[in-house]
Amino acid sequence: MQTTLKNAFSLVGTGLHSGRPVRLTVAPGDVDTGVVFYRLDISDCDNAVPARFNMVNDTKLCTRICNVAGVEVSTVEHLMAALAGCGVHNARVEINGPEVPIMDGSAKRFVREILTVGVVPQAAPVNILKILKPISVSEGDAYVELTPSDTFEIDFEIEFAARAIGRQKHVLNMQNGSFARELSDCRTFCRKSDVEHMQANGLARGGNLENAVVVDDAIVLNDEGFRRSDECVRHKMLDALGDLALAGVPVLGHYRGVRAGHRMTNLLLRKMFATPDTFEIVTATPDEAARLPGVGLTFDALDLAV
């Protein structure tokens, strides 16, 4: 069955790039609508922005979507990952600004709120996107691919010159609530020099040690340090789930990313949808539906205190 939220929840946080407060309300969505963002601060044109791969118009520092009227919402990936990871198929997201609040740089708070209000079934079967043939995209030393699998897995590898990060690799089957337990608390990360450069150019004005892990070669500048020894690669996996959720339906396949980011995952989705023999969208069997992310997930099983 498709699912949505039992009740709405609202959050107020800071936009990473604007540094301004943003109010976000996530409410139940109708069957077969997927996730749709609504810019409440815009009333003179169509303010609905569907969360779909073909609406992405920028991936430099985050994932930004834009409708045909030019209305944009940026930094959608963490909320999209939380919804997908908790098994929410349909949601209405109301926002009074151009970017989703960054919160602590992870999806932890979104997951906490989703599980607090609850997820309920809807009177419609859930469709899934099954990978039939391998499909890949490469660009320089970055590589992404989707290959057939009976489950949904994310396999990611990163390598950074900063010694605090270095080379990290992790593989995770996304069923049984593993996203919420093992990825949702992992924060975005960057080098100190990157932060200084971005802020000097008017970007990441809301960025600080409260919403990102910042490293200076071998040193982690946050007092908390890393939440996990491989937090950086796990955050990349979080981002990948959020970007893959822009397919519009849950994916059944094996995703592999090497030194990749938002741009590569979006290019992969675009190539896949332009190559129809590599996938099919079908109604999930009961066994397939039971293996999707978020099925059986309960708040009591998690440590998501804020």
Image: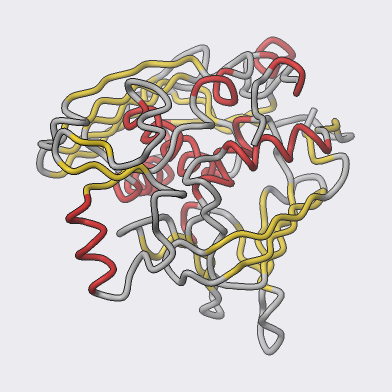
Residue at horizontal 79 percent and vertical 40 percent from the top: 4
Tell me: 135 left or right of 197: right
Res. 86 image quadrant? top right
Q: Position of residue 147 (x, y in %)?
A: 36, 22
Residue at horizontal 36 percent and vertical 35 percent from the top: 236
> Which of the two residues, 201 or 82, is positioned nearer the viewer here?
201
> Could you tell me which quadrant the N terminus lies in?
top right
Res. 232 image quadrant? top left
When the figure is inspected, residue 131 is found, relative to residue 105, above or below; the finding is above
Tell me: 217 left or right of 15: left
Q: How many badges with numbers are in the image?
A: 0
Tell me: 24 left or right of 237: right
**Residue closest to the far bottom:** 44
What kind of colouring is applied to the model shown?
A: secondary structure
Residue at horizontal 67 percent and vertical 72 percent from the top: 96
Q: Position of residue 138 (x, y in %)?
A: 18, 39
Q: Position of residue 32 (x, y in %)?
A: 75, 46
Tell me: 255 left or right of 85: left
When the figure is inspected, residue 297 is found, relative to residue 189, above or below; the finding is above
Residue at horizontal 26 percent and vertical 39 percent from the top: 260
Q: Position of residue 287 (x, y in %)?
A: 69, 10
When the figure is inspected, residue 45 is found, relative to residue 193, above or below; the finding is below
When the figure is inspected, residue 18 is found, relative to residue 297, above or below; the finding is below
> Could you tell me which quadrant the C terminus lies in?
top right
> Which of the two residues, 136 or 302, is positioned nearer the viewer here?
302
